[in-house]
Image (spheres, grey):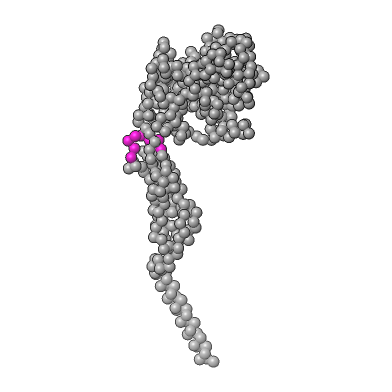
Amino acid sequence: MKKIFYLFLSLCLIFLPLKKASAIELDITSNNAILINQDEQKVLYEKNAQEVVPIASLTKIMTAIITIENIDNLDTEITITSSDLKGLKEANAAVAGFRVGQKVTIRDLLYGLLLPSGADAAQTLTRNVTNNREEFIEKMNEKAKELNLQNTHFKNETGLDAEGHVSTVEEVAKMLEYALQNKELKTILTSKRYTMHDGSFSVISTLYRNIQRNSLNMDYLLGGKTGTTDKAGLCLASIASKNGTNYILVTVKAPQEGNKANNFLDAKTIYEYFIDHYQNQLVIEEGEKILTLPTRFAKENEITFYSDKTWVKYLPKEFTKEDLKIEYSGEEKINYNTLVGSQLGTVNIYYQDELLKTIEIVLNTELHFDLIKYLNVHKIEVISCSIIILIIILWIIRKIKKRKKSV
């Protein structure tokens, strides 16, 4: 059942295309960025979103996905070995602080993986989730294919720079969105701090640590994952919510300039531009009139169609309903014998040439034939037919009379 559920989510992500962004330019230092309105699956902003680039520790989102989908009990206890920490000091990799001989749970390791971006947690998970590291990385690449991440390829579980270890910000956003469907992963990704099951030590989210250290007022930021390597620069995959709108933002290749958190400054610039300039706008209310169509030969002169739902769209704050353009294509008149449930056409609602909504116009009212209207419209035909019929009748009568006389 668990595998079927994740397969369904995979298919949803594959076949639900993202609507493209308008050409908005923002002053950011990151080379690559994408902001998505999760509620509408719409790209609000992008910069080199399809460029294939290193993604540093954003890799660990996939490491967590593979773990959560292959381990049934997150409270399974394991022991840290020296091989789990091998090579990390030499690579200058970020670690959570696990020690050789320490007993930890898979849950402890997931928090150590995603909050402080612990490479020690990543290597420990690869050893315990699958038979070997190569099999774990193979599963990461198989999952990327399953999610239709065509430009994503993993060479390791940590995100350390390696030839061919790449993705795009667009695909990382899809990967993060997939991870957030899992309740456990969402809880971890939005946590600020976690204490190990035995109380031995705590880990703090690097995301929240950066916000506090740089005194950034970003109360809308819910969580996410940071990353940094020489090739990838400063990276950030985050989720946010403000005024009823949910966002996913991924940025990579922000320059490393001392302690300056360029990835967070860019996130603040992007988020706050849209928070300041956009909001959810009422486009159509339930019961609002959409269209009126005349009838043909029916007692009902016209039929008015109303919206059966309230439609809200994420639009600029200066939006007004007067800015909407409504186009109807379909039957211009409804014939008296049209059956209830028949589709008559469609109404397209546009805002600044952007299609916001397509509404099918379906007849939901029974029509009644009006003979008087029919006769009024077809006077000439009726009179002509009547004359012809009368002539035929007179001709028949005449024939009958002639026959009687001859007898």
Residue 230 horizontal/vertical position (percent):
48, 13
Residue at horizontal 38 percent and vertical 21 percent from the top? 217
Residue 233 horizontal/vertical position (percent):
46, 16
- Residue 336's place in the image compared with 314, above or below, is below
- Residue 398's place in the image compared with 242, above or below, is below
* Left or right of 145 on screen, residue 326: left
* Left or right of 397 on screen, residue 275: left
Q: Is residue 314 magenta?
A: yes
Residue 220 visible within the image: yes
Q: Is residue 263 magenta?
A: no
Residue 153 horizontal/vertical position (percent):
56, 22
Q: Quadrant of residue 380?
A: bottom left
Residue 393 horizontal/vertical position (percent):
47, 80
* Left or right of 189 on screen, residue 303: left
* Residue extending farthest top: 90
Q: Quadrant of residue 245?
A: top left
Q: Quadrant of residue 48?
A: top left
Range of magenta residues: 313-320
- Residue 365's place in the image compared with 44, above or below, is below
Name the residue nearer the viewer: 208 or 367: 208
Residue at horizontal 41 percent and vertical 15 percent from the top? 213
Name the residue nearer the viewer: 270 or 27: 270
Residue 159 visible within the image: no
- Residue 285's place in the image compared with 53, above or below, is below
Q: Quadrant of the C terminus?
A: bottom right
Q: Quadrant of the N terminus?
A: top right
Name the residue nearer the viewer: 36 or 384: 36
What is the number of callouts on the image?
0
Residue at horizontal 53 percent and vertical 17 percent from the top? 195
